[in-house]
Structure formats: structure tokens, C-alpha cells
Image (tube, grey):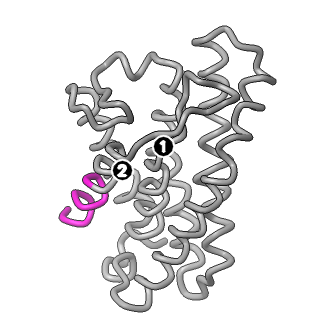
Amino acid sequence: MVYMAMLTSIVCALGFAPSVPNPLNPTVPITAQTLGVMLAGGLLGAKRGAGSMLVFLAIVAVGAPVLSGGRGGLSAFVAPTAGYLWSFPLSALMIGFFTERFWNNLTFLKAILINVCGGIILVYAIGSPVLSFVTEMDIRAAFLSNVAYLPGDFMKAVIAAYIAVKMKRMKPIIEQDKTFIA
């Protein structure tokens, strides 16, 4: 539970990092929070990682200003960024699931690939259709607007992979509780 709280607080803290306007879509800024989502899955595993992101969404729902620009509250769940938020627990679940499956032979490159699939592709796959629906933007334009996120998201995937692999060697959180590994 302490680890879940720690990762939840990291995602909250990353919300205070300055966001960068997306030149292809100014309604959805570039933020650092997906780094925390990738870390949650990669360090905590599927269940705990997803759980920590559900707690984060609950914190947002009660109005804590932990999203970029000091946003929070229920309105965030119907805003243009809603799909990206909704993807956080699923992303952490997917990253954690595959991290657990490859745990015994997890390499830096495998961890990057897991983060790219779960932390970038899945987030875009959920966020873009919601963005399109909420803003009445063409679905292709919504997916194309993600291009501006790619360099930063790839760097976040690399950073999260590096930290997960290093933490595995130092203090394997996932390995400590075999009930989370099938």
C-alpha cells in the first residue's frame, strides 16, 4: 500500500511540472504525468500499478488540482483530456502485466518496448477517440495530434524502463509478493 501511495504521489507531483502546449492540439498539453503511469506499472506490477492510478483518478475527481494547469474535479473526466486520464489505470495494468510476465529476463530494451506499447500506444488509442468525440475533431486529426507527444513520450518510456530495470536489481518490489505474478 505504501508503494501504491508513493507512485500515486509521484503522478500528482508530475502534474505540477510545467506543461508544454501541443502545437497540433492546444486543448491537450504535453505533460510529464505519463512517466508516473509507466513507473507505476513497471515498478508495482499490474494490480498495484492500476490501483495506484485509480487512487490518482479519485484524487482528481474530488477536486485536487493535480493535473497540469492546476486542474482537478469531475469536469476533467469529460474534458478533451478525459480519454488520456481514463487510460492511466489501463496503461499501468498493461505495463505491469507484461513486466511481470518478463520479470525473470526483463531487459532494458524489453522494458522500453513494454512502456511504448502500454504507456504510449494504449494511451493514444484511448485518448484520441475521446478527444475527437469531445472536441468534434476529425478522428484522424485527433490521432495525428499525438505526433507532438512522441519525442517526450519516448523519452519518458526510456526513463521509466531504466528506473524499472535498476529497481529490479536493487529492490524488486514485484518479486516480493508472488501473488501478483501468475
Question: Where, by quadrant of the figure, is residue 181 drawn?
Answer: bottom left
Q: Is residue 149 above or below residue 153?
A: above
Count of all numbered marks drawn on residues in the image: 2
Answer whether labels 1 and 2 touch (C-beta < 8 Å).
yes
- Find numbered disc 2 in the image and state the secondary structure of the residue it sits on: helix
Q: Position of residue 161 (x, y in %)?
A: 55, 72
Magenta region, main secondary structure:
helix
Residue 3 lies in the magenta-colored region: yes
Residue 6: x %, y % from top left:
24, 61
Rendered image quadrant of residue 46 = bottom left
- Secondary element under disc 1, as helix, strand or loop, is loop
Instruction: Classify residue 166 as left or right of residue 138.
Output: left
Residue shown at the point (28%, 32%) measured from the top left = 60
- Read off the residue under disc 1: 31
Of residue 103 and residue 154, the one placed in the foreground of this image is 154
In the image, residue 137 sits, relative to residue 69, either above or below, namely above
- x 55%, y 33%: residue: 21
> What is the magenta range?
1-9
Relative height, residue 145 to residue 147 (above, below): above
Tell me the amino acid under the disc marked 2.
Leu
Which of the image's four quarters has the N terminus?
bottom left
> Left or right: 76 with respect to 122?
left
Distance in Å between CA atoms under marks 1 and 2: 8 Å
Q: Which residue is mark 2?
A: 14
Residue 122 is inside the magenta segment:
no
Q: Observer-nearest residue: 103 or 62?
A: 62
Earlier in the chain: of badge 1 and badge 2, it is: 2
Q: Label 1 amino acid?
A: Thr
Q: Farthest residue to the bottom: give it.
A: 169
